Image (cartoon, rainbow, N blue to C red):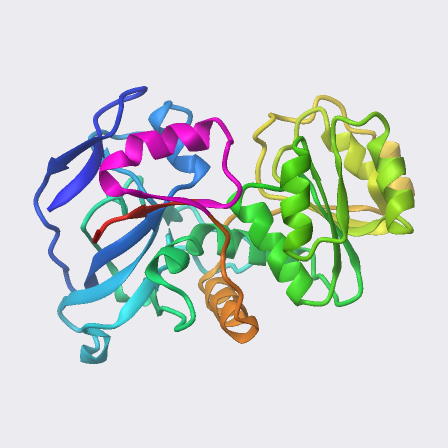
Amino acid sequence: MQALVLDGINQAVQLREVPTPQPGPGQVQVKLHAAALNHRDVWIQKGQYAGLKFPITLGADGAGTVTELGEGVDQSLRNQAVLINPGHNWGENPAAQGRDFAILGLPQDGTFAEYVCVPARYVQPKPAHLSFEQAAALPLGGVTAYRAVFTRAALQAGERVLVNGIGGGVALLALQMAVAAGAEVWVTSGSEEKIEKAVALGAKGGINYKTEKWPAILSKQAGGGFDVLVDSAGGPGFGDLLDAAVPGARIVFYGATNGDVPALAVRKVFWKQLSLLGSTMGTEQDFTDMVQFFEHHQLVPVIDQTLPLAEGEAALRRMEESLQFGKIVLNITG
């Protein structure tokens, strides 16, 4: 089969012929129709990720058709259209992943290939209203956003939500799910164009986070501060979220693309009774609930661009430059 293979740090991925994986006991072989990129793929390529091994086929997100079954797998899965849960071996504690938790695409070869084999428990029927490209855009970002917004922050209808740094896949999925759940959602971005696109998706409005004292300005526009604040950046700007939050608010964060917070105004946290909630990926139940949520509300992930598998390196560079609005998808079947 053909796969995009990474041979080492800071090397370009190469499309080459590799052996087609065969399913072991309890596994299925999936013929991939589409795969989607995540920042994780860029970080692995740049050597900024734990547990590196080479050569490796990147890719956590994928959707396709079950073509072969390993021993003990239910025959009804054969020829079924599926999307893949990329989070494996969560562990027994639903509150946090265990030491054996792993994400598809490292250390196991991932979805930037014509075929992949995974345990049968990690495939879910593809929602009928989604194309394979749309379904491939959902798994990692979808489960991350769902757990952050619902499992961790316990969002309720009618609450006011701020999604900080709109444009990336997880942030957009959080926006879509919060709107569908009956929340009033506002956004920030460094791009006015991205704010306008977010409004078209259901956001009430937004502000450029480069604006001086933006928390006060946006809170005035929104008619008050925010009950739930969703962030993936961290860094020096994290303190602004404390100012934008109402007393008793929940601030949930699933990344630190801008690094650690250099200084945290602890007095604001305890005086405002704020909850700071870390979140990563999600349990198998989170994944199932997320897919069902998308089916129930007929939501469609936002796709920035679809490129052929052979242009995977160009896709990675687009993601590295944060040019995208939505998910970057690789079409594998042509």
Above-or-below relation of 260 to 58: above
- The percent coordinates of residue 217 (x first, y second) are 88, 37
At horizontal 50% and vertical 37% (from top left) the residue drawn is 324
The quadrant where residue 154 appears:
bottom right
The reply, left or right, for residue 69 in relation to residue 85 is left
326 in magenta: yes
Q: Is residue 250 visible?
A: yes
Foreground pick, 223 / 304: 304
- The percent coordinates of residue 36 (x first, y second) are 37, 47
Foreground pick, 128 / 193: 193
At horizontal 54% and vertical 75% (from top left) the residue drawn is 296
- Range covered by the magenta-colored residues: 304-327
The quadrant where residue 244 appears:
top right
- The percent coordinates of residue 34 (x first, y second) are 30, 53
The reply, left or right, for residue 52 in relation to residue 70 is right
320 in magenta: yes
The quadrant where residue 179 appears:
bottom right
